[in-house]
Image (cartoon, rainbow, N blue to C red):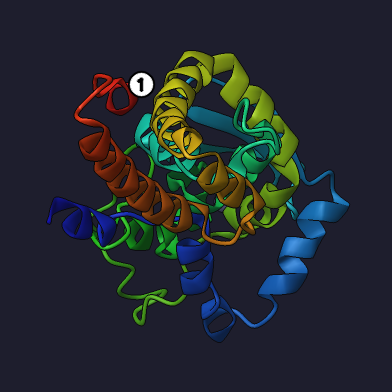
Amino acid sequence: MFSLFNYILEATASDIQRKQKSITRLFPPFPDRVKAIGDKGGVRLRDTDVENWYFNVHSGTKDAWYENVLHFKNIVETLGNLVKDRRLWVRDRSRVDLAKLAHEFLKKTHIKISCSCPASLYWGSDYILGLAKYDAKYGRQEPRAPKIRNPKQYGSMCKHLHAVMKVLPFYTATVARWLQDFYKDDIEKFEEEAKAEFGWIQKVAGELGKKKKEVEEKPEEKPEEISKEQARQAAVELAKRREEVGGEGEGDVFTG
Ligand SMILES: [Zn+2]
């Protein structure tokens, strides 16, 4: 289906980092150069907007800063999928746990990135990120392959983007605040949808007190499968009972 097709044209931060691993074959001292960026003031998040994060990243060698952009793709769609995951909810299931949501969002979201330094253009980063299988170059696309400087197309990022990706996991709290600022309404909508679905299951199970207890006492690993199966059984038993008592009581449990 379309989702599979879509998937291979997207890249998460870890997909890009996996491709980056070959960079030392092109440039063995690469890790030292990344470290030098940290020593000079490193990575600073300058600003955020509805789809982008803007970082200032120190050159590492010159007295200069470059702009790195981290662009999040399909944000609402990603949030919709994640909010349906009950493992990301608070214990009493009143709402999604924003910290857990942010953590998972950073792992699952598809991104595009760019750096304003000359190396990202001349050593092939812009070209490699822009390949159809990643579609991860933010902004202007670079159609020219790095035939002379990086003919085997090692790596995926310049040292500045590498530094940004490296610190990204430490921004989970910032992601949580950012989601709250820009996507509060979407998250609440998805929460209501998920609650409606869960409420339906609880109500059916509730009709048979014993079943409800089992639902609550089951361990967390696979909540959805367990609950659905139990709800199905509960619904079957309920329907049987109704038949026995002669169809009394309308089917309101199925509409809650
Ligand atoms: Zn760069």
Q: Is residue 134 left or right of residue 84?
A: left
Confirm or reject: label 1 Cβ below 8 Å from ligand 1: no
What residue is shown with label 1? 256
Q: Position of residue 50 (x, y in %)?
A: 48, 20
Around disc 1, counting alpha carbons within 10 Å, would you say few (fewer than 14), some (14 to 19), or many (20 or more)? some
Q: Using the image as rendered, state which of residue 219 and residue 19 is in the foreground.
A: 219
Secondary structure type for disc 1: loop
Q: Would you say residue 146 is visible in this rendering?
A: yes
The structure residue drawn at horizontal position 25% and vertical position 24%, both measured from the top left corner, is: 251
Q: Is residue 46 above or below residue 39?
A: above
Q: Is residue 256 left or right of residue 51?
A: left
Q: Using the image as rendered, state which of residue 112 and residue 41 is in the foreground.
A: 112
Image quarter of the C terminus: top left
The structure residue drawn at horizontal position 40% and vertical position 64%, both measured from the top left corner, is: 124
Q: Position of residue 16 (x, y in %)?
A: 47, 63
Q: Using the image as rendered, state which of residue 245 and residue 27 is in the foreground.
A: 245
The structure residue drawn at horizontal position 47% and vertical position 27%, both measured from the top left corner, is: 195
